[in-house]
Amino acid sequence: EIECVGIGNDIHDVETLGLKLSKLSDKTIEHNYRSVILNIAYTLIWGIFMKVLLINGSPHKEGCTFTALNEVAKTLEKNGIETEILYLGVKPIAGCIACGKCSQLGKCFIDDKVNEILARCDEFDGVVIGSPVYYAGPSGQIRAFLDRLFYAGGRRFAGKPGAAVVSCRRGGATAAFDQLNKYFTISSMPIVS
């Protein structure tokens, strides 16, 4: 179980929060996820953000990617941040065909989970994207989902913090991580790293 330092009334600045959070040991939180959790906590110190969407881009509902996202979610929830993990499922997700209908409709013409999240994106104050690494990149399913989500509604995410988590057995983690972070930078979202 993750040791959690609460963000309480006695914390009034980033330095105090940093001192408390720095006492978490690497044994308590895997090194790869520690920086994500710490930076989300720094971003959320003033209580501005209240709900974070975590997107599981793995075809395995409760596999390694879910485990990583769940660790982030548990830590955020212990600090009073509501979370929601979205599992994309195993059914194919169509990619963007650059038809431009989204600029007219305000949503994608393909009615699936992309439009469900677009309709609800104002309720999310941050986004964490998780994906396994396949051939040095994120899963095709999450790329198709994110291409359409950010093409149709990228401006709606501007200013909201984003973080990426990748699960990798061999090489390619940095390339996959970079691809996921591009969605944030192109959409004017600060990257939590």
Image (spheres, rainbow, N blue to C red):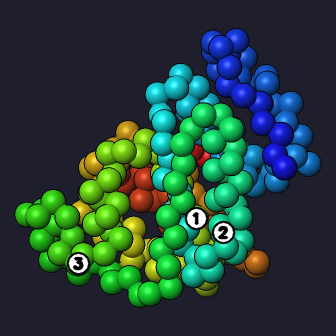
Would you call the spot at circle 2 few (<14 residues within 10 Å), some (14-19), or many (20 or more)?
Answer: many
Query: In the rendered view, would you say 161 is above or below 21?
Result: below
Residue annotated with mark 3 = 110
Distance from disc 1 to disc 3, alpha carbons, whole Å, reads 23 Å
Report the residue at 39% width, 72% height from top: 145
Residue 124 location (% of width, % of height)? 41, 46
**Circle 3/circle 2 CB separation < 8 Å:** no
Which of labels 1 and 3 is toward the front? 3
Would residue 185 appear left or right of 8 to someone viewing this image? left
Mark sitting earlier along the chain (1/3):
3
Using the rendered image of the protein, determine whether residue 162 is visible from the camera's viewpoint.
Answer: no
Distance from disc 1 to disc 2, alpha carbons, whole Å, reads 6 Å
Query: In the rendered view, would you say 86 is above or below 127?
Result: below
Residue 180 location (% of width, % of height)? 50, 63
Report the residue at 57% width, 38% height from top: 81
- Label 2 sits on what residue type? Thr
- The answer to which of 144 and 107 lies nearer the viewer is 107
**Circle 1/circle 2 CB separation < 8 Å:** yes
Residue 23 location (% of width, % of height)? 86, 30
Using the rendered image of the protein, determine whether residue 82 is visible from the camera's viewpoint.
Answer: yes
Mark sitting earlier along the chain (1/2):
2
Q: Residue furthest left?
A: 104
Which corner quadrant of the image does residue 62 belong to? bottom right
Residue annotated with mark 2 = 65
Would residue 44 appear left or right of 167 to someone viewing this image? left
Disc 2 element: helix
- Label 3 sits on what residue type? Ile
Disc 3 element: loop
Q: Which mark is residue 130?
A: 1
- Label 1 sits on what residue type? Gly
Would residue 95 appear left or right of 22 to someone viewing this image? left
Report the residue at 39% width, 77% height from top: 144
